[in-house]
Amino acid sequence: MRRAFVAFTGLTLIVAGLVGCGRFSFESREAWRRQAEEACLSAKLVQPTAYMSFASEIDGPGTCGITYPIRTTAFARGDVGLTSRQTLACPIIPEIDSWLARTVQPAAELYFGQRVVDLRAGSYSCRSRNHRPGAKMSEHSFGNALDVMAFRLSDGREITIKSGWRGRPDEQDFLREVFIGACRHFTTVLGPGSDMFHYDHFHLDLARHDPAGRRRVCRPVIKFDPRLDPGTAAVRARPSPVPNAARAERPALPAADPARDPFGQAPRLSSRMDPMRAPGPDARVPAAPPRGGFFDND
């Protein structure tokens, strides 16, 4: 009788262990991920260079991995470096390059008179979303996401998301300009104010939130008049110009009060329109997602 009890108990523990690790033991990566990688490579959207090389397949643990991982130390044909080497899947790299060329560099020249020369960023990591036990696997687990913590300008100045989102006026404007621009390139964009996990970085990914891959998540919803035309990256004239003197005197936002603002979200800037609801000429700008609640997409 005792032997039977011990055997039953052992079998129960084994079954419980298999169930607990089911995500790693029995699930497989979605087929579209490999297909997207192969399509990107077939189109030669990414090719080996002095700063970009192909590595051996990453397979596991569990569903984590990249079929054709690419290790890179720079984007934009080497013009924008990385403070540390990153590993990504092919599809997201052209979108990062396009975002840098069409939004980030024009915005840096507009607001600072400088160019961005480096990014402080993070990429591949086999983990659940926001490191939360039981959550779905992060897009970082498939090399399909990039976290951007800071931009370094050609004069050596570093603009961090953590301090710049509520910092000097030019930093606020630059970060909001590149945040809104990112929503035209990536299916998920999360920044300060979206939830407690993204107070210090922009999360960018190409997740498929629906079978057709059309739904987009862009949080927080902010009110800000972009000065860059989304179609040409040209600077648009302001409908109501603000004198330079008055603009220079606009104070930085006060530091976040954890009791009132636990996620570090800046107060909404006054605007004639909500860019998430008024996409303008670029059809890829998403409509505003539902308000309220947290998105667990990192």
Image: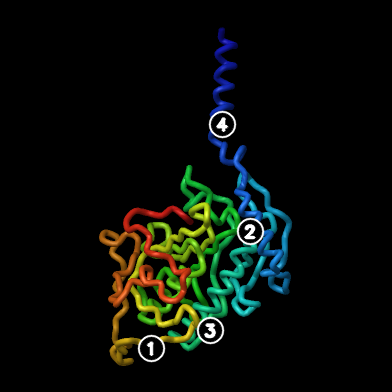
Which tag, 1 or 3, sits closer to the chain's start?
3
Cα–Cα span, label 1 and label 3? 21 Å
Image: 295 above or below 46: above
**Residue at point 62% right, 54% down?**
33
Q: Give residue 239's position: percent from left, percent from top.
A: 32, 86
Q: Secondary structure at mark 1?
A: loop
Q: Nearer the viewer, mark 1 or mark 3?
A: 1
Q: Nearer the viewer, mark 2 or mark 3?
A: 2
Residue 36 is marked as: 2
**Residue at point 59% right, 11% down?**
3
Q: Which residue matches tag 3?
A: 115
- 266 to the left or right of 20: left
Q: In which quarter of the view is residue 197 placed?
A: bottom left
Q: Which residue matches tag 4?
A: 17
**Residue at point 46% right, 70% down?**
283
The amino acid type found where label 2 is placed reads Ala
Q: Give residue 257's position: percent from left, percent from top.
A: 28, 64
Cα–Cα span, label 2 and label 3? 31 Å
Q: Secondary structure at mark 2?
A: helix
- 252 to the left or right of 229: left
Cα–Cα span, label 4 and label 3? 52 Å
Image: 244 above or below 40: below
Cα–Cα span, label 4 and label 1? 62 Å
**Extreme residue toward the left, this view:** 260
In the foreground, 183 or 23 = 183
